[in-house]
Image (spheres, rainbow, N blue to C red):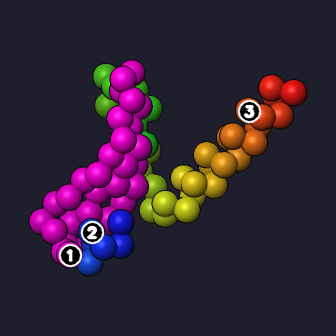
Amino acid sequence: MSKDVASKPDYLENRFTTVDGFELGYYASADSSSWYVKLEKYDSDSSLFIESGGYIESAFTDAMKKIDELKK
């Protein structure tokens, strides 16, 4: 993401989208950037905007640990 912000684009968005509409991505413009998570495809209130990508990474890591615990 830092390379995208450094290039100072008018608008740039990178995202991963699943078949059922879950999205994880970020957007960057000339002076700012933000991560987002969209939980549902058709619900406009299901988007979360997050300042730091590290927060998303730690949340997913914690979720994976909890899933592994529950599998035991």
Q: Position of residue 43 (x, y in %)?
A: 34, 25
Q: Residue at x 19, y 74 (%)?
A: 8
Residue under numbered circle 1: 7
Q: Residue at x 36, y 60 (%)?
A: 34
Residue 66 is marked as none
Q: Which quadrant does the N terminus fall into?
A: bottom left
Q: Position of residue 18 (x, y in %)?
A: 39, 29
Local packing at callout 1 (Cα closer than 10 Å; few below 14, some 14-19, many 20+) is: few
Q: Amino acid at mark 1?
A: Ser
Residue under numbered circle 2: 4
| Mark closer to the chain start, 3 or 1 | 1
Q: Amino acid at mark 3?
A: Ile
In the image, is residue 35 part of the stretch drawn in magenta?
Answer: yes
Q: Quadrant of residue 27?
A: bottom left
Q: Quadrant of residue 24?
A: top left
Question: Is residue 43 in view?
Answer: no
Q: Amino acid at mark 2?
A: Asp
Q: Position of residue 31 (x, y in %)?
A: 24, 74
- Numbered disc 2: secondary structure: helix
In the image, is residue 22 part of the stretch drawn in magenta?
Answer: yes
**In the rendered structure, which segment of residues is drawn in magenta?**
7-36
| Mark closer to the chain start, 3 or 2 | 2
Q: Residue at x 49, y 63 (%)?
A: 52
Residue under numbered circle 3: 67
- Numbered disc 3: secondary structure: helix
Local packing at callout 3 (Cα closer than 10 Å; few below 14, some 14-19, many 20+) is: few
